[in-house]
């Protein structure tokens, strides 16, 4: 019987870490699990985890809903682009970055991520996204109507942008370990 390497195999993870020379950047819809999976991936690899949305709030000294209310989405996206560029460029090769759902749709941000990072598109079905996003009330784009309809529309509009990420992983309702295994496999193949 052939022994299958798992994400718990320290030699496998050590070999992968040796080959990674840039940040791993998780992209995809809100609610797909970029932050929760990203934290586990960073822990597995011994990297630091950074949530771009948290960094934006720190830089703006406002919450994301407050930024949207006070300045609008275009202003937020410009700040998001600048923060992600900083995170990509400040020695973050041993870092996992979770981006906001719309970040990879910005051409400049996407180019920065594709040129300087390992982009991983985390994808989920609409039912999973609706369930996960309903847990938090801090999603400004979902306050503009029916969340299921908004998520469906955004997912369709953003698909072409997300599909430019070289690694595509489906994040289902199963354990995060399954998603982590798919990400590790994707990175191993990409490198």
Image (tube, rainbow, N blue to C red):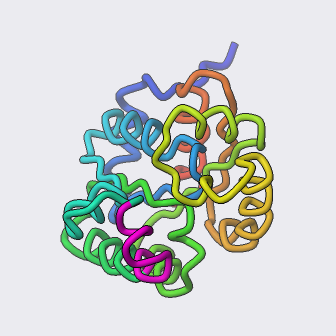
Highlighted range, magenta: 66-77
Question: At which x and y percent is residue 37?
Answer: 47, 38
Per the image, is 74 magenta? yes
Nearest the viewer among 10 and 151 is 151
Q: Is residue 75 left or right of residue 141?
A: left
Nearest the viewer among 147 and 188 is 147
The residue positioned 23% from the left and 69% from the top of the image is 60
Please identify the quarter of the rendering in which residue 179 is found. Answer: top right
The residue positioned 36% from the left and 38% from the top of the image is 39
Considering only vertical position in the picture, is 7 above or below 111? above
Q: Quadrant of the N terminus?
A: top right
Nearest the viewer among 126 and 28 is 126
Please identify the quarter of the rendering in which residue 87 is found. Answer: bottom left
The dominant secondary structure in magenta is helix
Per the image, is 96 magenta? no
The residue positioned 69% from the left and 43% from the top of the image is 170
Question: At which x and y percent is residue 96?
Answer: 36, 52
Considering only vertical position in the picture, is 159 above or below 29? below
- The number of numbered discs placed on residues in the rendered structure image is 0
Considering only vertical position in the picture, is 132 above or below 164? above
Q: Residue furthest bottom?
A: 108
Residue 93 in view here: no
Q: Is residue 96 left or right of residue 29?
A: left
Residue 69 in view here: yes
Question: At which x and y percent is residue 50?
Answer: 29, 52
Considering only vertical position in the picture, is 51 above or below 171? below
């Amino acid at each position: 019987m052939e022994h299958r390497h798992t994400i718990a195999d320290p030699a496998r993870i050590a070999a992968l870490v040796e080959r990674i020379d840039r940040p791993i950047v998780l992209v995809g819809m809100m609610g797909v699990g970029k932050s929760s999976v990203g934290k586990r991936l960073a822990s597995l690899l011994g990297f630091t985890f950074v949530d771009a949305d948290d960094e934006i709030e720190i830089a703006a000294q406002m919450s994301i809903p407050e930024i949207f209310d006070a300045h609008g989405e275009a202003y937020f996206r410009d700040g998001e682009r600048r923060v992600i560029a900083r995170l990509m460029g400040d020695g973050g090769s041993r870092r996992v970055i979770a981006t906001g759902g719309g970040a990879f749709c910005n051409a400049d941000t996407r180019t920065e991520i594709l040129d300087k990072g390992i982009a991983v598109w985390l994808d989920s079905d609409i039912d999973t996204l609706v369930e996960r996003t309903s847990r938090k009330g801090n999603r400004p784009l979902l306050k503009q109507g029916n969340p299921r309809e908004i998520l469906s529309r955004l997912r369709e509009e953003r698909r072409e942008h997300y599909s430019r990420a070289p690694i595509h992983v489906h994040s289902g309702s199963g354990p995060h370990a399954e998603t982590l295994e798919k990400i590790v496999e994707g990175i191993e193949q990409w490198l």
